[in-house]
Image (cartoon, rainbow, N blue to C red):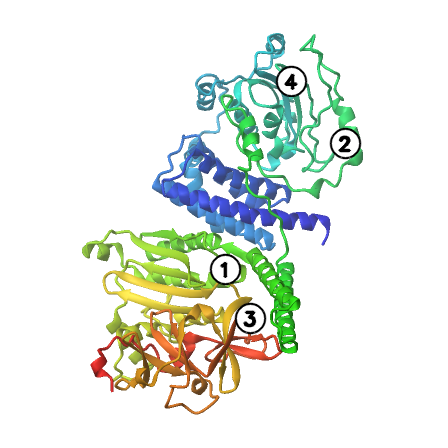
Amino acid sequence: MDQMEEIRETFFLECEELLEAMEAGLLSMNSGEADAETVNAVFRAVHSIKGGAGAFGLESLVRFAHSFETTLDEVRAARLVASEPVMRTLLKSGDVLADLVRASQANDEIDDAAHADVLAELTAHIGKEECAAEDEDATDDFVPMTIDVGDDNADADEAETSGASIAETQDSGEGLEAFEADAQDDGQQRYRIDFRPFPELYSRGNETFLLLRALTTFGEAEIQCNTDDLPLLGEVDPEGAYLSWTVLLTTESSEEDVAATFEFVQGDCELGIKLLGGGATQTQAQAQAPDMGAPGDSTVEPTAQSASSDDPLAEIPATSSTEAQAEQNDAAPDPAAKPTPPEPPAPKPASKPAAGKTAAKEAGGGPKPTVRVELDRVDRLINLVGELVINQAMLSECVMEASDNHNSNVATGLEEFKQLTREIQESVMAIRAQPVKSLFQRMSRIVREASDATGKSVELHVEGETTEVDKTVIERLADPLTHMIRNAVDHGLETPDKREANGKSARGAVLLTAAHRSGRVVIEVGDDGAGINRERVKQIAIDKGLIPEDAELTNSEIDNLLFLPGFSTASEVSDLSGRGVGMDVVKRAIQALGGRISVASTPGEGTTFSISLPLTLAVLDGMVVDVAGQTLVVPISAVIETLQPNEADLHNVCADGPTVRIRGTFVPIVDVGAQLGYRNPKSDFHDQVILLVETDDGVGTALAVDSIHDQRQVVIKGLESNYGQVRGIAAATILGDGRIALILDAEALVSNAGGAIAPAEQPLELAS
C-alpha cells in the first residue's frame, strides 16, 4: 500500500468517528436537549468530512457536505430554527452523508440523483430555492446597480453584536497606521492578519466569509478587503482568487488560537500574523500553495524574534514570502501526502481566554489518548493469551500430579502464575470490549427509514448504550438487530389512526436497551404496539402446514411460532417484510453467537424480544463435570446452585417425568447423559449431582450429572468452523491434561428435554 492510499484509509477511519459524533449530536438536537456546543460539534464533523473529501477529489461528497454544513451554519447562527421539519431533513442528510462516505471509500459510482430530494430540502430551508426561482423569472436585461454591504447586512449586524465590525474597502492604509499607533500593552493582544486565499481554497468548498466571521468571535475586529489584484471583467477566471483581506484584531486570546482559525485551510492560502502590541513576540506565517507543500504542513511558522521592550512596535524583519516559499518548496513532500485536517473547535470569545482550555487539558479533563491497532493483531494476541491459559492449566495439573505437597513453593508460585495469567487475559479481552453505542446509533436510521416506509410516526428510546460487549459480537449483531427493529415498526406498532382509537398516542415508541446480567449481555427490543395476535399467528402456522390443525399450544408456544422458518404475518411483499425471511434468520444468527432469543407479549400493550449473549466469544468461567465417563463444561453463568438430592426429594409429578423438590418447588430433571446419547435414560437420580440452572425465559431446570471436578476458566473453541453445529453443545475447549471437553448449552438441553417446562410451583400434596 502506497503512502497516499494509507492516508486515504486513515481519512475514512476518521470519518467513522466523525459520523458517529455527528449522529449523536443530531439525535440530541432532535430530542431538544442540545446546547450550542452540540450544534457546533455537528457542524465541525460535517465540515471536517467535507474538507478531507476535497483533498481527495470526492466531488459528490464535497457538494452534499457543503449544502449540509451551510444549513447547519444557519442553525448555529440562530437564523434557522431547528424545528421538527428541519431536524427531519438534517437527520436524513446525516444518513445520506454516511452513505456517500461509504460509497466513496469503496470507490463505488455515486448517483447524485439518488439524494437530490434531500439536497432540495436543505436548500429550501436556507432559502436558496426561492432565490433560484426568482433568477429563472428574471429578464435578460442587465441593469447596473450598487450594493450596500454596510449596516443592512445581517451578518455584519451579528458581528457587531459580538463586539466586532466588518468593513470592506480598498483604502486601508490610514486604518492600519492608526491601529498600529494605538497598540499598547493594556492586557489586550493586537494582531494584524494578512489573508490571501488561493483558488484551491474555494475548489475544496471552503468559504472565506466563515473564516473571517470566526475571527470576530475573539474580540474587536476590523476586516478590510483588498481588490487591487481584481482584473477587468473580460479577464476574470471564474475559478480564480483575486481578493485578499487584512484583519485588525484586538483580543485576549493567544496567537496560537488565532492561527488555529485558519488551520483547516492551511496549504490553500497565504497567511501572515503580526503581533503589534500587548505582547513580546511577533510572527509572520506563509501558508503554502498546493504546489509548494503538503496540506498537512504547519499553518504558522515563527520567523521573528522577541521585540525590543523599549519599542513595542519594533518589528524584526521576517522572511519574505518568496524566500519562505522557496525554502519550504525544497523540503516539501508530495502535495497529496496528507488530507486536509479537521476544522479546529470554534474559538472562544475574548471574555474567556483560551488559556483556561489549556489548563483543563493539563488537569486531565481532555479525552484519553488512544491508538489505532488492526483487529487481526488483537485477535492474534487474544489467541496467544488463550493458549497461555491452556498451558498454565496443563502445567498446574502436571505439577500437582507429580507432587503430594500442595503447599510447596512450586505450588504457591503456580497459584500466583494462575492469577497473573487471569489478569492478563482479562486485560487483553478488555481491548476488544466496545460500547454498543455505535450499534444503537445505526438503529436510529433504521427506525427513520421504517417509519417513512410504513407511514407511521415512531420514536426510538435507547437505554444502556454504554454497555460494553465484545467487538465481534457487535459486528455480527447488526443484521439481526436491524431485522428486529424493522419488525417492531412494521408488525408491532399500529397505524396512527388505530393507536388514537385505542387511546394511545399517535406516535409509537420502540425501546432498545442493553444491560449486563449474570455474566451475559441482554439486549431487548420492545414496542408499545398491539402485541402478538396469537389467534392469527396460530392460523397462519396451520395454513402454512407448520403445525397440525388440532395442535393445542400455550401462549408461549404460539409466540415461539414466529421463529419457525418461512413464517411471516405480512399479507403482501414490501420493502420491509413478506419475503419469507423472518425471525428464524434472527434466531440462527443469535445462536451462532452462543446466544438465545425469547419473546414476551401482552395484547394491547406491546411485544419485547430479548437477546442474551456471552460477554466474549473467547473465554468463560466453567464448571467441569463428569457424565457417563465424559468430561463436560457447564458455564458458571447458567448455574444457580448445586446439590446432592435425597431420595425423599425425588418425585414424579403428573406427566412431567422426574422432578426434584427444592425448597418446596418441584423442578424437572434433565438427564444430561441420556440427552447427549452417552447412555440410556436413568430412572433413579439419588446418586446424581444436580445443577440447578435457569434459562432466559425464567424456567428453572435441574441438570443431572455424575460428579463435579472443579471450576476453572476455559478457552472457547468454536465447533461450527471446525466440525459443525451440535444440538445441546455450545462450543469446545482444551483442558489442562490435553483432553477436549464439550461446553454445554443449557438452554438447548432444556429445549431438547421437552421444551419450556413451566416452573413447578405446585402444592406438595400433588406429588406421587
Taking the spot 44% from the left edge, 68% from the top edge, the residue there is: 637
Q: Which mark is residue 275?
A: 4
Q: Closer to the camera, 219 or 214?
A: 219
Q: Amino acid at mark 3?
A: Ile
Labels 1 and 4: the sequence-earlier one: 4
Which residue, given by chain and number where applicable, does mark 2 sit on? 328
Q: Amino acid at mark 1?
A: Ile
Percent across and percent down for residue 232 are: 64, 22
Instruction: Please give left or right for residue 422 compared with residue 39 in the image.
Output: right
Taking the spot 43% from the left edge, 75% from the top edge, the residue there is: 746
Mark 4 or mark 2, whichever is nearer to me: 4
Which residue, given by chain and number where applicable, does mark 3 sit on? 716
Instruction: Please give left or right for residue 277 compared with residue 506 in the image.
Output: right
Q: CA distance from mark 2 to mark 1?
A: 47 Å
Disc 1 is placed on an element classified as: helix
Which residue, given by chain and number where applicable, does mark 1 sit on? 474
Number of other residues with Cα within 10 Å of mark 2, as a class: few under 14, some 14 to 19, many 20 or more: some
Percent across and percent down for residue 70 are: 48, 36
Q: CA distance from mark 4 to mark 3?
A: 64 Å
Q: Amino acid at mark 2?
A: Gln
The reply to whether dot 1 and dot 3 touch (C-beta < 8 Å) is no
- Location of the C terminus (image quadrant): bottom left
Mark 2 or mark 1, whichever is nearer to me: 1
Disc 2 is placed on an element classified as: helix
Q: Which mark is residue 173?
A: none
Q: Closer to the camera, 530 or 136?
A: 530
